Amino acid sequence: MADSSPRYLLKLSGEALAGPQGFGHDAATMKRIAGEIAECANTGAQMAVVVGGGNIIRGARMAADGGDRVAGDHMGMLGTLINGIAMREAIREAGAASNLFSGFPAPTMCETFSQRAVLASLEAGEVVVLAGGTGSPFFTTDTGATLRAAEIGADAILKATQVDGVYSADPKTDPSATRYATISLDEALAKGLQVMDTAALALARDNALPIIVFSIHQPGALGSVVAGEDVGSRITP
Ligand code: UDP
């Protein structure tokens, strides 16, 4: 890193942007999340944000319905670009400079991802929004987030989820589920915990990338994580 600013890779699912209706973009939700990201950047953290696309379309779902998986994944990646444009605009409106990169070329809309260009943007103080996942089908944006975190040398992956950490079982359906304060990447993989897909967890383990899991629904939680407070669950290398 060129300076001592902490560098974070925030993974935001498409679902996080959809708000209560579960589809598309909820203006109030986007505004709150963008405001929290802008605040983190304006207090000195380098912020890269990988956006998912599940609020628009998922390729695996299209394949399950009998469609072609690759075509479905191409549509899914385009969905993440829609979210990326929306998030870049929301972050700018919230008062932080922001730049969008895509994992597949879309040159009339944004730059294509490269490590060099993204690092220059982060070092210039811009919030970097990363759309398009890995740019290839058969992957998820969780894997894309871990890949980008490794490429840009992030200090940690911040995984925003629907619940406030990593649980031993799904807390929405199993009342006996308990939350881990910390758990190792090896253990999370061995237990098959559903916090990120296996490819993403394995890539994080192989590259010694810590993951901090927190709730996107808890206002201020992102700022607390970036401030180093003990929020959510830590998955350690
Ligand atoms: N996708 C892909 N390659 C990638 C990342 C994503 O093909 O590297 C496609 C895939 O179809 C996926 C969709 O984009 O279902 C949306 O991404 P994801 O499901 O990860 O979004 P999230 O669940 O985070 O909203």
Image (tube, grey):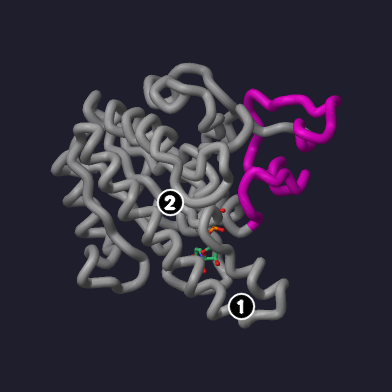
Q: Is residue 218 above or below residue 208?
A: above
Residue indicated by mark 2: 51
Image x and y of residue 23, in percent: 54, 50
Judged from this view, the residue extending furthest toward the bottom is 68
Question: Residue at 31% across / 28% down in the picture?
Answer: 40
Image x and y of residue 39, in percent: 28, 26
Q: Is residue 208 left or right of residue 104?
A: right
Question: Residue at 31% across / 55% down in the picture?
Answer: 85
Q: Is residue 187 above or below residue 181?
A: below
Q: Give the quarter of the image for residue 41.
A: top left
Residue indicated by mark 1: 69
- Return the residue nearer the eye: 196 or 170: 170
Which portion, as a residue range, is magenta? 169-198
SS state under label 2 = strand
Q: Is mark 1 within 8 Å of ligand 1?
A: no
Image x and y of residue 3, in percent: 19, 36
Q: Give the quarter of the image for residue 96.
A: top left
- Return the residue nearer the eye: 26 or 207: 26
Answer yes or no: is residue 155 visible.
no
Q: Earlier in the sequence, mark 2 or mark 1?
A: 2
Q: Are marks 2 and 1 in contact (CB under 8 Å)?
A: no
SS state under label 1 = helix
Question: What's the CA distance linking mark 2 and mark 1?
Answer: 20 Å
Amino acid type, label 2: Val
Answer yes or no: is residue 43 visible.
yes
Classify the position of the N terminus by image quarter.
top left
- Return the residue nearer the eye: 203 or 38: 38
In the image, is residue 119 part of the stretch drawn in magenta?
A: no
Amino acid type, label 1: Arg
| Dominant SS in magenta | loop
Question: Residue at 45% across / 57% down in the picture?
Answer: 147
Q: Is residue 53 left or right of residue 99?
A: right
